Amino acid sequence: MKKCLVFADTTRERVRDALQHALPLIRRHVDVEQYDLAVAEDHECGPADFAIVFGGDGSILRVARILGCRQVPVIGVNIGKFGFLAEINPEQLHRAIDTLAAGDFTVVPRMMLRCQATREGQMLRESLALNDAVISRGARSRMISIGLLIDDEQVTDYNGDGIIISTPVGSTAHSLAAGGSILEPSLRAFAITPICPHTLSNRPLVIPAEHTIALVVERAEVAVGLTMDGQVYSDLQTGDRVTIRRAEQDFQLIQTGTRSYYKTLRSKLGWGGHPNYGIR
């Protein structure tokens, strides 16, 4: 019998109810090893054939980091609001569990990034991220200056509210809200998107993922922080360096064929809607 990892944040009532309803069904088909996302991310997951995540896209982002270098195919059961990565709802899980247990599913790799923050050569934080790494200012409305280097070559200085380095998966998240490009998720690339840049010459940039990106906090008269996937945070100060590379491992996303990427863009982001001409 195949083994399945089940992840859920049991502090959320809707997630807890969906999990309790689905667990007997799942256990009839596979051996289950259950993890609670309400506790710290120090799980030591054993080997498994696949994983089921109950929650929204944020839960999937957490699981991607928890799995670390031992990635297994993951399917999300959407109990959240958006469901860009979480493809099926609880009712659809009843139909999908047979094919999951049989291993009859399609897995698509999704690029992840590895982010390292250092201060005077000492490691402050290292983490995987599936969506993005963001350097941004705090609450006070003062600009910060961030130097961008690609493969140790100085590219430019960004003066504004911060900068986002996103994967193709993350290009439809914070990067898109800041005016960045949408990247097809099978690409191997980084999207570099400034947040409210002070000059019009600083535009979004897309580069191949084999390059190494370095961000240096050149000037920060206000609080500055590094956030990965909107969930892992570290304070930064002037002189700190953030290095971003493509991670050695890819996230393994199970696709059921219930929707295509472009259908997801249309349904979740309202892409392609007609303008409202205000006809009275």
Image (spheres, rainbow, N blue to C red):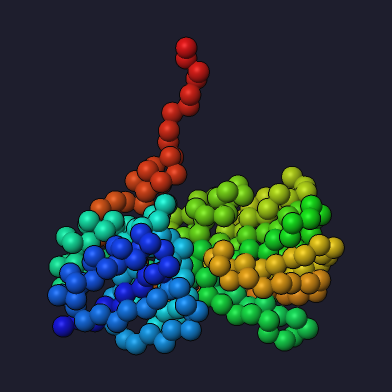
Image coordinates of residue 72 in percent, x first then y, are 34, 77
Image coordinates of residue 96 in percent, x first then y, are 19, 63
Q: Residue at x 60, y 75 (%)?
A: 115
Q: Residue at x 68, y 64 (%)?
A: 135
Image coordinates of residue 43 in percent, x first then y, are 43, 84
Q: Residue at x 34, y 66 (%)?
A: 16
Q: Is residue 159 above or below residue 103?
A: above
For residue 206, which quarter of the picture? Answer: bottom right
Q: Is residue 237 left or right of residue 251?
A: right
User: Looking at the rendering, in which quadrant would you find the N terminus?
Assistant: bottom left
Q: Is residue 243 left or right of residue 96?
A: right
Q: Can see residue 189?
A: no
Query: Which of the two residues, 15 or 78, is positioned nearer the viewer here?
Result: 15
Q: Residue at x 48, y 26 (%)?
A: 275
Image coordinates of residue 33 in percent, x first then y, are 29, 82
Q: Is residue 31 left or right of residue 72?
A: left
